[in-house]
């Protein structure tokens, strides 16, 4: 572990963080936050490559992580973490805020990589998924598909581990507080249990709305919205009332965000979402949208859903049959209305005025972006 | 995240650590170290259950981790971590040493769970592997095997994340030093890259000794022996010469440990090893033993190895044909000799006398246990 470059690299990383902190006297916009988190992440990956001089294979893994990050993504978790900080204080975000923000994005990369293996997804952010890239690399191997999946599992494992490494500033900064550590631990556990519920419910053709809602809460609402906001706010020393306001805002917003995702998964344009349009339908994802369609379906419509939903060989024409049922049962319109009412609730939660005004404005704008997005 | 029980649980955990530390005025034996690491781990899992009152499904995951830990295992990494500490100082191990030791065991649980998924193993420590337990739970599901594997991937993810959580004492103890953090990060990356090399080499029927040795170095020697010893020593403030002695001891020992494992994988008794005897042969594991057999094989023996090694449907009788080739080529005896010479090297490394005498004696005894074990 004697690497002369190492100290230099770590210093370089610190300069990036100081630059980030120094420029943040005013509220940063979403693109600036995303680009800052991305810079930190890429710097961390460069550092890992330099540390691992005896592991030339690691470059393949860091390269795939760089590609996944460079391919886009909404960076919504880093954005909300920094917004959570700004909601509580006018001070510029500390390096700990940026570390947590970047760590959330790396954890998300892990979650996407493992989810894509489990869902057998082919596309992510408009590019081949990691397990398909590995499978192509081993196309002459007797079991290239399995090998690709297993290598992608290892890639996810590395990203998960590094999402912790990234949290700890090696330049002797104080450690994260107990409350921040507990919230991060909760975020990870909730997300993984949410994924477990999701996969064990996928393929069940029941109209089980309760499970669909629990999956939304764990896999999206808490993971994507509530916990990142809470983390930024905790780092800024938020009080109980402020944390409550943030949760009352975050929960309807997170639900709306996922309901929109479910609609996009059925009716969206794959050119916009970067995912295959038929993936959710072929997998038979257990969503509120589909549970609602089942609940409202006539016997003939139920038969049609049972026949086509979750069929791995689903054609574009079969997908259209499902889409017609979802529309004709009124499920599509019902979910649009659910989104509308949640948008109102999220906005109303901010009316108590316990948060910093600039950040509150940004949180209001975010509601419309998240609920009405097409990607 | 308001749990009145939580502070109580954390205090209880601290008491366990203090007890461990207090009783460690003299060198602990392997069983005591293993039992202490196990107690810490189980206490940590209890704490996670209590924290996750809104996640009843988590009990299934913590239960499987408890079962895996209770089913045995050699606890060699915790043991070496504590021995690494004792090699440098007569002071009793600190709570940080116990945390790192328990964290290594939980990381190992993660590695076993994911490895077993990738290797399609059915047994681990004499019980069904995690993915088989999950598959049995979902036996009425249309794709129970896949679902079992995916749930086990999530279980491994949770264990990996918690191996980091466990490192950080929530009772405001000072954080781990930069050197310890770097060694832990290196251990994880090396292990995962070693697994990647292992799986991408499995099924290649070449007599590629170099790759087989690199896999041993990363997946076993560094992971199981060198890094855990180094971690304990770093925590005790070891100097450069002491760290060098430990590495010169650890590397031949680790190589010998894995060479024994390869022999047990082919010739061992599954009742002793807790793994299926045919697993390694059915997978076509790329080992030094097999690469040596290939290098020495006659054309007829090569054809036989190509035909049977890596055949998932391998019978006990086919396995005997492979065993005969491995014996007849002299590969078995050659590997026994490699083990013997490495045992001598490991023992000779200790002759410089830079380490504490009691620990040095324990390290000498360990060489014989590790190289001559039957499990």
Image (tube, coloured by chain):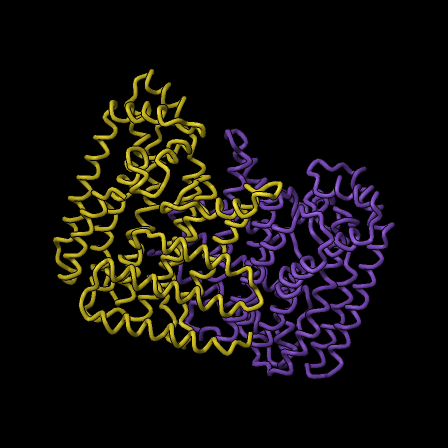
Chain colours: A purple, B yellow
Could you tell me residue B58's position as x and y percent? Answer: 52, 60
In-front residue for pair B184/A117: A117
- Please give the name of the residue rendered at 61% of the width and 50% of the height, measured from the top-left corner: A199
- The quarter of the picture where residue A104 lies is bottom right
Q: Quadrant of the N terminus of chain B?
A: bottom right
Look at the image and tell me whether residue A99 can be seen. Answer: no
Against A302, residue B30 (above or below) is below
- Please give the name of the residue rendered at 72% of the width and 77% of the height, measured from the top-left corner: A360
- Please give the name of the residue rendered at 80% of the width and 44% of the height, measured from the top-left corner: A322
- The quarter of the picture where residue B255 lies is top left
- Please give the name of the residue rendered at 68% of the width and 44% of the height, measured from the top-left corner: A283
Against A152, residue A354 (above or below) is below
Look at the image and tell me whether residue B199 can be seen. Answer: yes
In-front residue for pair A204/B265: A204
Against B338, residue A266 (above or below) is below
Could you tell me residue B219's position as x and y percent? Answer: 36, 46
Could you tell me residue A69's position as x and y percent? Answer: 60, 54
In-front residue for pair B191/B330: B330
Q: Quadrant of the C terminus of chain B?
A: top left
- The answer to whether residue B239 is left or right of residue B198 is left
Could you tell me residue A252's position as x and y percent? Answer: 72, 69
- The answer to whether residue B175 is left or right of residue A329 is left
């Amino acid at each position: 572990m004697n690497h002369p470059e190492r100290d230099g690299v770590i210093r370089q990383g610190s300069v990036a963080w100081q630059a980030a902190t120094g420029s943040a006297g005013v509220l940063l916009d979403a693109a600036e936050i995303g680009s800052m988190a991305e810079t930190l992440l890429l710097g961390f990956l460069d550092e890992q490559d330099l540390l691992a001089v005896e592991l030339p294979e690691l470059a393949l893994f860091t390269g795939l992580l760089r590609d996944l990050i460079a391919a886009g993504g909404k960076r919504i978790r880093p954005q909300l973490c920094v917004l959570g900080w700004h909601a509580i204080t006018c001070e510029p975000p500390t390096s700990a805020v940026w570390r947590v923000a970047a760590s959330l994005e790396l954890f998300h990369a892990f979650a996407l990589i493992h989810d894509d293996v489990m869902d057998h997804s082919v596309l992510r952010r408009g590019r081949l998924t990691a397990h398909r890239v590995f499978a192509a690399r081993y196309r002459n191997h007797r079991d290239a598909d399995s090998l690709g999946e297993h290598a992608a599992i290892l890639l996810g494992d590395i990203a998960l581990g590094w999402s912790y490494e990234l949290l700890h500033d090696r330049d002797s900064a104080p450690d994260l507080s107990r409350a921040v550590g507990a919230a991060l631990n909760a975020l990870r556990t909730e997300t993984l249990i949410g994924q477990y519920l999701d996969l064990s419910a996928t393929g069940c053709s029941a109209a089980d709305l309760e499970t669909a809602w629990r999956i939304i809460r764990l896999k999206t609402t808490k993971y994507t919205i509530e916990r990142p906001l809470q983390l930024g706010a905790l780092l800024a020393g938020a009080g109980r009332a402020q944390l409550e306001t943030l949760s009352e805002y975050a929960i309807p917003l997170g639900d709306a965000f996922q309901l929109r995702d479910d609609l996009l998964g059925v009716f969206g344009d794959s050119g916009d979402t970067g995912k295959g349009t038929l993936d959710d339908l072929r997998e038979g994802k257990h969503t509120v949208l589909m549970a609602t369609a089942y609940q409202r379906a006539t016997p003939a419509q139920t038969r049609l859903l049972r026949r086509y939903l979750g069929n791995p060989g689903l054609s574009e024409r079969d997908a259209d049959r499902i889409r017609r049922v979802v529309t004709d049962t009124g499920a599509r319109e019902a979910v649009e209305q659910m989104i509308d009412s949640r948008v109102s609730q999220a906005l109303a939660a901010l009316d108590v005025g316990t948060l910093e005004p600039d950040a509150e404005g940004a949180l209001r704008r975010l509601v419309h972006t998240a609920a009405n997005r097409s990607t």
